[in-house]
């Protein structure tokens, strides 16, 4: 899961891009990058670390131009430790393109073979995003060459994105700059990863346009949220600020990732017409109903959230059950999000640094802890142990999400079943594993109902980590076993050609 942001403005965009990326920092803490376009010249700076660590005043001064894109990285493919894999990526032909990508491709090796062996292009890193860039570059070149011209037309751009949709599988929200022409943005045909369009009109009546992973970026910059980029749609904004859009996928279906609403997105964002905050509040009501059915409420003295994502759900759950709500854990806001930290040992250590219990809130009480989800169980186990060490008599655990039983292959780093604590376990067995006195999970149908009630136009969801059904239809047992083996050996999901067996049996995992 990464964050992307693109701007076409009538003023320098370097500071705007920096400020916008800080609003997306929760989506990736591994690396950050900005590329600007001044005339036909790109200026780019990127590196490992958070936004405030990567960019200094001297770097910002060099990022001149009124058009640009930015990226914050959370590694799910390639080499997490490599500075070379910070985005955006650049290719010189055709015209010159820089690209930033949020998501994960599922047929990267097939695309790599085509790009390198057939199209004679060079891919320098193990990142699927660089492969995606080269697919786009090839399709743009093919479109222009077929017209016997040297100038890029709108039809060339939209036709190229259409061919990319046909060839590429997986999840992607993309922003790209084409030197001398403008900003291109597009979203995968299922809309798995979010992408929103915003605008601002200046004092001269000129319109600035932005495309971002989340609407919260526009709130911070005084832009207005215009709409979501539709699944399969491409948006192109010329250097003088003219907006063009077209549906480029032969078939499209709005099926956003459920985990965005549960955990990843900021609560002050609106994704596909759904307020993330209100969705989490409503999740609390549904979870309270299940807690009421499965636990003895007389044994619950107080309800506590695991800060911060679960707070809206926990507050609503406590109100619904008529139980006191308490903040028992104080969060160190200078520690990053433990779920997206690389490595189990790092995550485990960071939990103790991130959360500190207040003994007075736990001593002699039966506690119901509410979290957004339980994935690996590392954080949950440490938190339950801290609560009991602080004097809690009993600790129950409630998850606003269903059991995470299957790998996510669309951009969330939960790639092996062995890492998932709920895989092959009942709720009671999960409770035993995390040392809790009971564990309650949200029902998948109830979670989907919460989101659909807020936007009935949502046709389906990427709920693969809960259901094991994969929208793109190219994920089977062999694919998951190879991912597991790759992860276990310490190799990247995609590093070089020939690592992936092409005997993957395609099965359609679409929801009803």
Image (cartoon, rainbow, N blue to C red):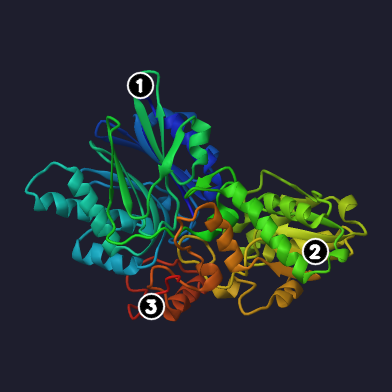
The x and y percentages for residue 325 are 81, 50
Residue that numbered label 2 is attached to: 385
Question: What's the residue at 45%, 71% (across, down)?
Answer: 512
Is residue 353 in sight in this rendering?
Answer: no
Viewer-nearest of discs 1 and 3: 1
Residue that numbered label 3 is attached to: 507
CA gap, disc 1 to disc 3?
51 Å
**Of residues 248 and 30, the one drawn nearer to the viewer in this rendering:** 248
**Neighbourhood count class around disc 3 (C-alpha, 10 Å): few under 14, some 14–19, many 20 upward:** some
Question: What's the residue at 55%, 56% (across, down)?
Answer: 453
Q: Is residue 52 above or below residue 465?
A: above
Relative to 174, 451 lies left or right: right
Is residue 363 in sight in this rendering?
Answer: yes
Residue that numbered label 1 is attached to: 205
Q: Disc 2 or 3, which lies upstream in sequence?
A: 2
Q: At numbered mark 2, what does the secondary structure look like: helix, strand or loop? A: helix
Relative to 405, 256 lies left or right: left
Relative to 4, 160 lies left or right: left
The x and y percentages for residue 382 are 75, 62
**Of residues 158 and 453, the one drawn nearer to the viewer in this rendering:** 453
CA gap, disc 1 to disc 2?
59 Å
**Neighbourhood count class around disc 2 (C-alpha, 10 Å): few under 14, some 14–19, many 20 upward:** some
Q: Is residue 508 above or below residue 216?
A: below
Q: Is residue 154 above or below residue 287?
A: above
Q: At numbered mark 3, what does the secondary structure look like: helix, strand or loop? A: loop
Q: Disc 1 or 2, which lies upstream in sequence?
A: 1
Q: Disc 1 or 3, which lies upstream in sequence?
A: 1
Total count of labels: 3
**Looking at the image, which residue sits at the far left?**
148
**Of residues 229 and 121, the one drawn nearer to the viewer in this rendering:** 229
């Amino acid at each position: 899961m990464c964050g992307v942001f693109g701007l076409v403005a009538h003023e320098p965009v370097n500071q705007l891009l920096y400020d916008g990326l800080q609003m997306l920092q929760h989506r990736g803490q591994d690396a950050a990058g900005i590329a600007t376009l001044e005339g036909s010249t790109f200026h780019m700076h990127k590196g490992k670390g958070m936004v405030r660590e990567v960019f200094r005043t001297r770097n910002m001064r060099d990022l001149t131009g009124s058009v640009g894109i930015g990226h914050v990285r959370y590694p799910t493919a390639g080499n997490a430790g490599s500075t070379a894999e910070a985005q955006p990526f650049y290719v010189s032909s055709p015209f010159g393109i820089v690209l930033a990508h949020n998501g994960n491709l599922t047929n990267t090796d097939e695309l790599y073979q085509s790009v390198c062996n057939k199209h004679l292009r060079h891919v320098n890193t193990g990142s699927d995003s660089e492969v995606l860039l080269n697919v786009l570059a090839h399709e743009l070149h093919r479109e222009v060459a077929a017209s016997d011209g040297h100038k890029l037309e709108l039809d060339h751009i939209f036709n190229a994105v259409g061919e990319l949709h046909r060839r590429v599988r997986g999840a992607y929200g993309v922003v790209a700059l084409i030197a001398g022409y403008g900003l291109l943005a597009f979203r995968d045909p299922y809309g798995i990863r979010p992408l929103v369009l915003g605008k601002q009109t200046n004092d001269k009546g000129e319109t600035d346009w932005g495309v971002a992973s989340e609407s919260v970026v526009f709130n911070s910059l005084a832009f207005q949220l215009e709409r979501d980029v539709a699944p399969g749609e491409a948006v192109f904004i010329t250097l003088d600020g003219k907006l063009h859009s077209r549906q480029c996928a032969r078939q499209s279906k709005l099926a956003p990732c459920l985990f965005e609403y549960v955990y990843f997105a900021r609560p002050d964002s609106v994704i596909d017409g759904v307020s993330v905050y209100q969705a989490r509040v409503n999740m609390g009501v549904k979870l309270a109903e299940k807690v009421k059915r499965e636990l003895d409420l007389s044994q619950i003295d107080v309800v506590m959230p695991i800060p911060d994502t679960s707070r809206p759900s926990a507050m609503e759950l406590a109100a619904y059950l008529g139980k006191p709500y308490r903040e028992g854990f104080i969060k160190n806001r200078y520690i990053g999000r433990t779920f997206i930290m690389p490595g189990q040992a790092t995550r485990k250590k960071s939990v103790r640094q991130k959360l500190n219990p207040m003994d007075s809130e736990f001593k002699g009480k039966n506690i119901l802890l509410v979290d957004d989800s339980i994935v690996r169980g590392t954080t949950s186990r440490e938190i339950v142990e801290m609560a009991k060490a602080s004097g809690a008599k009993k600790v129950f655990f409630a998850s606003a999400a269903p059991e995470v039983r299957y790998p996510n292959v669309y951009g969330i780093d939960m790639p092996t079943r062995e890492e998932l604590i709920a895989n092959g376990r009942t709720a009671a067995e999960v409770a035993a594993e995390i040392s809790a006195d009971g564990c309650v999970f949200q029902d998948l149908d109830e979670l989907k109902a919460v989101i659909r009630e807020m936007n009935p136009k949502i046709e389906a969801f990427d709920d693969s980590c809960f259901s094991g059904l994969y929208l793109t239809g190219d994920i089977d047992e062999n694919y998951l076993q190879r991912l597991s083996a790759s992860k276990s050996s310490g190799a990247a999901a995609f590093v070089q050609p020939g690592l992936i067996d092409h005997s993957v049996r395609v099965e359609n995992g679409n929801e009803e």
